[in-house]
Image (cartoon, rainbow, N blue to C red):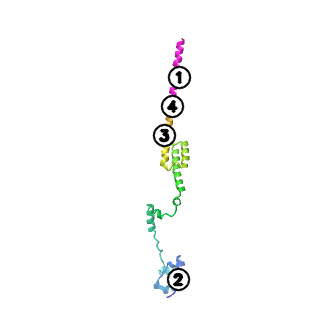
Amino acid sequence: MVSLRLQKRLAASVLGCGQRKIWLDPNEVNEISLANSRRNVARLHRDGLIIKKPEVVHSRARVALRDAAKRKGRHTGHGKRRGTANARLPFKVLWMRRMRILRRLLMKMRDAKKIDKHIYHSLYMLSKGNQFKNKRVLTETIHRMKSDRAEEKALAEQADARKSRAAKRVAKRELREAKLTSGSEQ
């Protein structure tokens, strides 16, 4: 048996792969053994006596299946967990997400003139102080604050109207008394 180590090395260099990927035709050993240059090896490759083997398939189908199952929440029980809850999904990330959601809502409502800058600021500071656990609680608080403000405003208007009516009544009474006193003097 003729040694084809040189030819295999040259073929690997010419074809740009490793020696384990080179196939030399076992029926044409004598002809291949005569090739002692890169040009000859390249010619043999063109003729099909030397072939570059295909890449070995390393299938990821099983990985894809498992990932799909994990997205559905499978394979994530206590026995599969290696890190702490904080390592798996940091509390800080949850906090940042929540703050961004709440602040975005506040800005949107302020820009739409649904809340004034005073309510905005007080709610901003409350959300920073961890008062609202989610968007729903914040919107409920906003509605409650708005209704309270409207109620206060209505009460203030009623009080003003009552005061003005009382003032008119007093003025009318004084006018009547002044007329009576002037009438009795004559």
Q: How busy is the neighbourhood of tag 3: few (under 14 within 10 Å), some, or many (20 plus)?
A: few
Identify the residue under disc 1: 171
Residue 106 screen position, x and y as percent? 52, 47
Indicate the amino acid at tag 3: Ser
Gap between marks 3 and 1 measured at Cα: 36 Å
Which of the marked residues, 2 or 4, is nearer the chain's N terminus? Answer: 2
Where 132 sits versus 67, above or below? above
Q: How busy is the neighbourhood of tag 1: few (under 14 within 10 Å), some, or many (20 plus)?
A: few
Q: Which residues are magenta?
A: 157-185
Q: Are marks 3 and 2 in contact (CB under 8 Å)?
A: no
Identify the residue under disc 2: 7
Where is residue 61, by image quadrant? bottom left
Residue 117 screen position, x and y as percent? 55, 43
Identify the residue under disc 3: 147
Please name the residue shown 53% across and 13% down the image: 184
Which numbered mark, 2 or 4, is in the foreground of this view? Answer: 4
Indicate the amino acid at tag 4: Ala
Count up the numbered dots.
4
Residue 108 screen position, x and y as percent? 51, 47
Identify the residue under disc 4: 159
